[in-house]
Each structure stands twice: as structure tokens, then as C-alpha cells.
Amino acid sequence: MTATTEKPKEEPLLEKLGPGLITGAADDDPSGIAAYSQGGAQFGYSLLWTLFLTYPLMVGIQLVSARIGRVSGYGLAGNMRRHYPAPILYGLVGLLLVANAINIGADLSAMADAFALLIGGPRHAYIVVIGLLCVVLQVFISYVRYVRVLKWLTLSLFAYVGVVFTVEIPWAEVLRGALVPGLSLKAEYVTTVVAIFGTTISPYLFFWQASQECEELRAVKADKPLHNHPEQAIPHMRRMKLDTVIGMAFSNLIAFFIMLTTAATLHAHGVTDIQSSAQAAEALRPLAGRFAFLLFSMGIIGTGLLAVPILAGSSAFALAETFRWRRGLHLTPLRGARFYGVIAISTLIGVALAFSDIDPIRALYWAAVVNGVISAPIMVAMMFMSANPKVMGEFVIGTRLKVLGWVATAVMAAAVTVMFLQLLF
């Protein structure tokens, strides 16, 4: 009788997806929806090409961040603390905290506006309730269960796929706008392109994905940092690549549909000035019907519930690694008091900003400026870390990923340069 060996069961696709999928979905937050909506409303289909350009750049730089976390066992701030001077670490993390707080405030405002559009009622009450819900989910739900919640929330983004099927689309124009860049040197066009790049490639996404790879190590006892356990590399490298490729494709696909919807409805009817995601939803109602309006509004709420905890969480991971605090969503509230305190305070500051008289559009603009300014140096630091054997051991990145990462860094540096030139002139 011959012994037979059973093949290990193939893990379901959804189980293989985690940090990359959630990070990609969080990229389409209400602030991002506003940027994509403005692009579609103001310029029609002529900016669709930007999402094809940013996709490989997103994959490259997010895969770099994921590998740094999984190989070293530390997030980005932890590695910066170990390998870079303290002033650089404090400066970059400080700017990240400011940008994240402003983004949280803008996202809470957009979600509250969407609730008010859907069911009426006081927007300030919605801001408080949503803020509390986001904090409670992170503090009192275990990491494994919390990741499942976030995965299900990514499904809310399919609302924007549904909207496309409620309107008439001139597919020939769409194909031309997607494949042939309609370049222009007009200030409004350049600003919108920079906003799309800044929205798509954001620092909080780098910090979050690297930190979540570290969280995955804690969630599965058998998994160890690859730096010290290279025998575990093959399945994890494959999983990270698949996770990131699919997550970023999902992110850009949804952004594509948002821009496509607003181009086919708002731009086609002469509505070219959209300043917020809620305004885009309201403008859709008379042009595309109530169903499209409902889908668009519910998408804003779903993406906000996904993005706000990730913005606050990326701040908490960065600050905790900077000062060597206990960190992680697996901690009890008592053991992780300082870590969860950062999440709560970040969200509270966002609530206060949403309550204030600060113009949310100006707030978003300056958040984009700060994100753009810190993206390039953080990406430079990441690229050097990913090629450093002291950080990555034998898993320093290969030539193809290195080229892709440096191209993404160069594009962001160019975007920052354009932004500063526009500020100065």
C-alpha cells in the first residue's frame, strides 16, 4: 500500500488579500472622491489617462513599503528611527500627523454631508457619531475581526461601478481619454493632475501598509520577519505581490469609475465646479436620477468608514514606533493606552476641524500640499531602506522594483515642484 501525500489546501483569494486590498480601498476616501469628481466634472474624459499612469507607480511604492514591513518586522517610522537622524524622523512624522488630522476632518465632514443628503438631520451630530464609531471599532475589536470588517467595507466602493450603469457612456470618447493624454499647461489642468497624483500616492498609505504587514506577523505566531527567517519568504513574497497588485488595481478602477461618472453627467451638462464629494452626489441627482445619487452618497459613507480609521491608525503606528511605545490593534485598551490614545486624539482633532469655520476646501488643499511635500522625501527614505542590507538582509529589492519605485518618487517630486511653482507664481 503506497502512502499518498495530500496537497495543502489552496487558501481562498480573499484570505490572501489584506494590507494591500485595504490600503488600496482606503485611497478612495471622500477627499479622493472629491478630487476625482472635480477632474471628471471640469475636464471630462481627458484626465482618465492619469489613472493608468499612477497604477504601476502605486504598485511599486506600496510593494516597497509592504516588503520593508514584512522583511524587517518594523514599520516605516521604526526603520527610520533605527537608520536615520532623529530630526528627520520627527519632522516627517510630525507633518504626517498634521496632514492626517486635516484629512480626517475633511472626510468626517463629507460623510456627515452625505448622511444629511440621504436622510436629513443635523450634520454635527453625524460627525460626532461617526468619529466615535471609528474609534470604538479600532479600540475594542480584535485585529483579526477588525480586518474582516475593513475587508467588507471595501465592497462599498462597488457603488461607483453601479453608478456607471445608470448613465449613458460614450465609450469611444472614454477610450480616447484613457489612452491619449490630453496634455495642457493651463494652471487649472496642472493643478488637477497634481491633486490626482497627490490623492493617489499618499504618505499615510505607505505607513499603514508597512505597519499592517507587521500586524500580520503578530496575528500568526508561526510567521516571523523574513530578515531572520528567509525560509518563509516564497509564499509571503507571492502573497504581498498579489495583494498589492489587486489592491492598487481596485483603487484605480474605482477612481476611474468616479471620474467617468462625473464626466458623463456633470461635465456633459456644464457642471464643471465641484468642490466636495457631497456636492458631486447632490449634483448627480437631477442629471442621473435618484438611484445614481443614492449609490454615490452611500459610497462616500462607506469609504469614509474605511479611510478615517486608517488615517488615525497610520498616525498611531508612526508615533508609537517613533517613541518605542507598545503598538498594534491586537493590544487591549489598557496595554495599548498610548497607541489607542493617538487614534482617539487624531479623530477628535478631525471632529473639531469638521466643527470649525475652516473652509473644508482650503483645508483639503493644504492637506494635499503637506502630503505632496512629505511624500517625496519619505519615498526617497523608503527606496534607500529597501536597498539597504542592514534593513532588508538578502531581500533587498530587485532592479525592476527599484526602477519602478524611483520613477514613482521622481513623479511625486515633479508634482511637488509644480505645486511650489504655482504657489510662488
Image: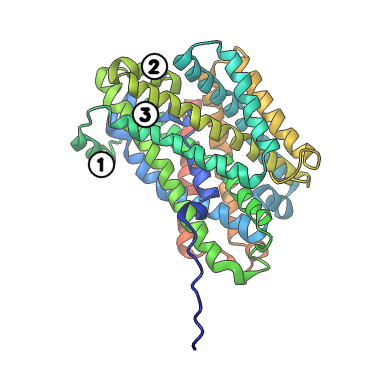
Residue 88 shows up from this direction: no
Judging by the rendered image, the residue that carries numbered circle 2 is: 282
Q: Secondary structure at mark 2?
A: helix
Quarter assignment of residue 269: top left
Q: Point out residue 139 in the picture as x, y percentages from the top left corner.
A: 70, 36
Mark 3 vs 2, N-terminal side: 3
Amino acid bearing label 3: Gly
Q: Callout 2: few (<14), some (14-19), or many (20+) C-alpha neighbours within 10 Å?
A: some
Mark 1 and mark 3: Cα distance apart in space: 16 Å
Judging by the rendered image, the residue that carries numbered circle 3 is: 39
Amino acid bearing label 2: Glu
Give the residue at x 39% y 38%.
254
Judging by the rendered image, the residue that carries numbered circle 1 is: 180
Mark 3 and mark 2: Cα distance apart in space: 17 Å
Q: CB under 8 Å between callouts 3 and 2?
A: no
Mark 2 and mark 1: Cα distance apart in space: 31 Å
Quarter assignment of residue 311: top right
Give the residue at x 21% y 36%.
171
